[in-house]
Image: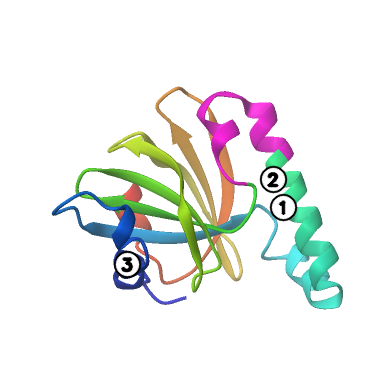
Amino acid sequence: MANITKRVQKKLAEYLRGGESVQAALLVEPKGTYGLGAIATVVAPRTAGKVLDAQAAQRHADAGGTASQFPGRSCVIAKTDQRLLVSISNGLWFSAPVLELPLGGATITDHQKKLLSHRLTFTFSDGTAVIVDAQRGQPLDDFK
């Protein structure tokens, strides 16, 4: 996956404050999207994708706090010079932000390299966390 920061700047422009700019952006997927989940997605894309999304949404809800507000589906985490924005996205299409956090409100606290991707744990300032998958080639260090 290429770095999509410039694309996110354009796609989320209407939701940015005056002079605000996107510094880094990550496209993340529900835990399990890459690996065995990828095989299931090839065989039955709609069904497998819905199952992974539902499982992620339930895990986030069970975690409570800020984690419960994090989307259970593919989304972009955009770090601007002022805050963090989370927008449901497939990398080409972007929703209005569904979650806004202060800078430092979420950081990558665990990073595991997988065969085709990265498994990331984002921990929020309230101590709750979500686990997501991300393709390689993205600016992970900007969120640590």
Report helix, strand or loop for mark 3: helix
Q: Which quarter of the figure has residue 19?
A: bottom left
Real-space CA distance between mark 2 and mark 1, rounded to the nearest whole angstrom:
5 Å
Query: Mark 2: few, some, or many residues within 10 Å (few <14, many ≥20)?
Result: many
The x and y percentages for residue 121 are: 52, 43
The x and y percentages for residue 102 are: 30, 34
Q: Which quarter of the figure has residue 32?
A: bottom right
Real-space CA distance between mark 1 and mark 3, rounded to the nearest whole angstrom:
24 Å
Q: Residue at x 22, y 49 (%)?
A: 17
Real-space CA distance between mark 3 and mark 2, rounded to the nearest whole angstrom:
25 Å
Determine contact: label 2, label 1, CB under 8 Å: yes
Q: Is residue 71 left or right of residue 4?
A: right
Q: Residue at x 34, y 62 (%)?
A: 139
Report helix, strand or loop for mark 1: helix
Residue 5, label in figure: 3
Q: Earlier in the sequence, mark 3 or mark 2?
A: 3
Q: Residue at x 58, y 51 (%)?
A: 132
Determine contact: label 3, label 2, CB under 8 Å: no
Report helix, strand or loop for mark 2: helix
The amino acid on which the numbered mark 1 sits, given as a three-letter code, is: Asp
The amino acid on which the numbered mark 2 sits, given as a three-letter code, is: Ala
Residue 53, label in figure: 1
Q: Main secondary structure of the magenta part?
A: helix
Pick the residue in front: 125 or 120: 125
Residue 74 appears in the figure: yes
Pick the residue in front: 28 or 12: 12
Q: Is residue 63 magenta?
A: yes
Which residue bears the numbered disc 2? 56
Q: Earlier in the sequence, mark 1 or mark 3?
A: 3
Determine contact: label 1, label 3, CB under 8 Å: no
Range of magenta residues? 58-71
The amino acid on which the numbered mark 3 sits, given as a three-letter code, is: Thr
